[in-house]
Amino acid sequence: MSLVSTKGMLLDARQKGYAVGAFNANNLEMAQGIVMAAEKEKAPVIVQVSQGGAEHGGLEEMAAIIKSLAAKASVPVALHLDHGVDVVYNMRCLRVGFTSLMYDGSKLAFAENVRITREVVLAAHAVGVPVEAELGKVPKDPTGITLDDLKKYMTSPEEAKAFVEQTNVDALAIAVGNMHKMKIKEAKIDVERIAAIRQVVAVPLVLHGASGVPDEAVTAAVKAGICKINVHTQLGKSFTEKLREIFQADPTTVDLRKYMGLGREALMEEVRAKIRLFGASGKASGVPEVAVEPEEYIRQEIVE
């Protein structure tokens, strides 16, 4: 099937009490492993490309790879921009066929975050593409972050409510003790805060930095209202650990097809485990189809 929007997926997840896995892809094998896992689990899936990932694999190239995989897939696949930090980059992603965007203005003051997020929302909604935004601050690196820092960064329910009402975003990433680039599962998640935000916000909630969240906390977060869960670091860890194992066993190996294929399989199994943890296995057939045709919008209306 063609790429679909994240909107139908996340609304279904919110209604049925599960979370859709959103997995970052930086190259062909990562994208393949993610979609293969979703098909085996019969789950909807979001394949994400960050600005950094696009700099590595190429924005147009990664979009083309994921479009091709989605066209052959038997489950709903969405192509999402992860942490787009400016308006221009979000518009570039629209132009190459992304079916979901994220504007991350979490470093900005509240009013400025609202203003720019609303600009992205207006442009994206004009062509039927949903937008995720972030409120609060999810640290990009856990090094040196204290508990007091995390408490200071957390999203408040009152601001979350006002932000969603003023921007009309389709999903909101929140800071509840989660951090990016954690290699050990030791994040302390404020589940009560998730539930409180869920009570006052009408859109699906997103948890970033899930690689560092213990499994029991992930389950509790989904029960409290998280509908989309981002995973990146753990995928890279699974892939590279397999490669290290191969090279230690045979340092002379040079057949890229063999070792990259085994890395892809390791990543696929990690994604399958996450999908099951999120409660998304078997949910593909129930997701309403919200197709997007971003390539058909009037390009001249989006000015860089």
Image (cartoon, rainbow, N blue to C red):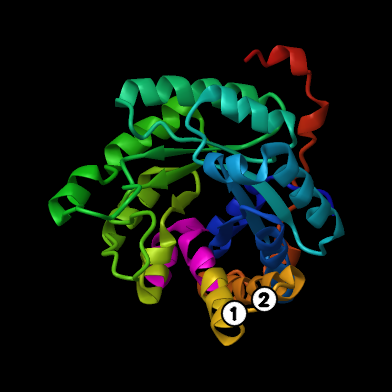
Q: Give the residue number, with chain letter if any, for mark 2.
A: 265
Relative horizontal placement of residue 190, taking residue 209 as reference (left or right):
left
Residue 251 shows which numbered tag? 1
Relative horizontal placement of residue 17, taking residue 32 as reference (left or right):
left
Q: Residue furthest bottom?
A: 249
Q: Amino acid at mark 1?
A: Pro
Is 233 part of what is drawn in magenta?
yes
Give the percent coordinates (x, y) of residue 243: 58, 74
- Quadrant of residue 246 in the image? bottom right
Q: Amino acid at mark 2?
A: Glu
**Secondary structure beneath label 2:** helix
Viewer-nearest of labels 1 and 2? 1
- Up the image or down, 101 lies above or below 199; here it is above
- Residue at position x 76%, y 70% in the image: 257
Q: Which residues are magenta?
A: 219-238
- Residue at position x 42%, y 62% in the image: 210
The reply to whether the C-beta atoms of the residues labelled 1 and 2 are less than 8 Å apart is no
- Quadrant of residue 263 in the image? bottom right
Q: Is residue 22 visible?
A: yes
Residue 200 shows which numbered tag? none
**Secondary structure beneath label 1:** loop
- How far is disc 1 from disc 2 in space, using C-alphas? 20 Å
Give the percent coordinates (x, y) of residue 47: 64, 54
Residue count near mark 1 (Cα–Cα under 10 Å), binned few <14, some 14–19, many ≥20: few
**Image quadrant for the C terminus?**
top right
Give the percent coordinates (x, y) of residue 217: 35, 70
**Image quadrant for the N terminus?**
bottom right
Is 24 part of what is drawn in magenta?
no
Q: Is residue 279 visible?
A: no
First in sequence, mark 1 or 2: give its number. Answer: 1
Residue placed most toward the observer, 214 or 197:
214
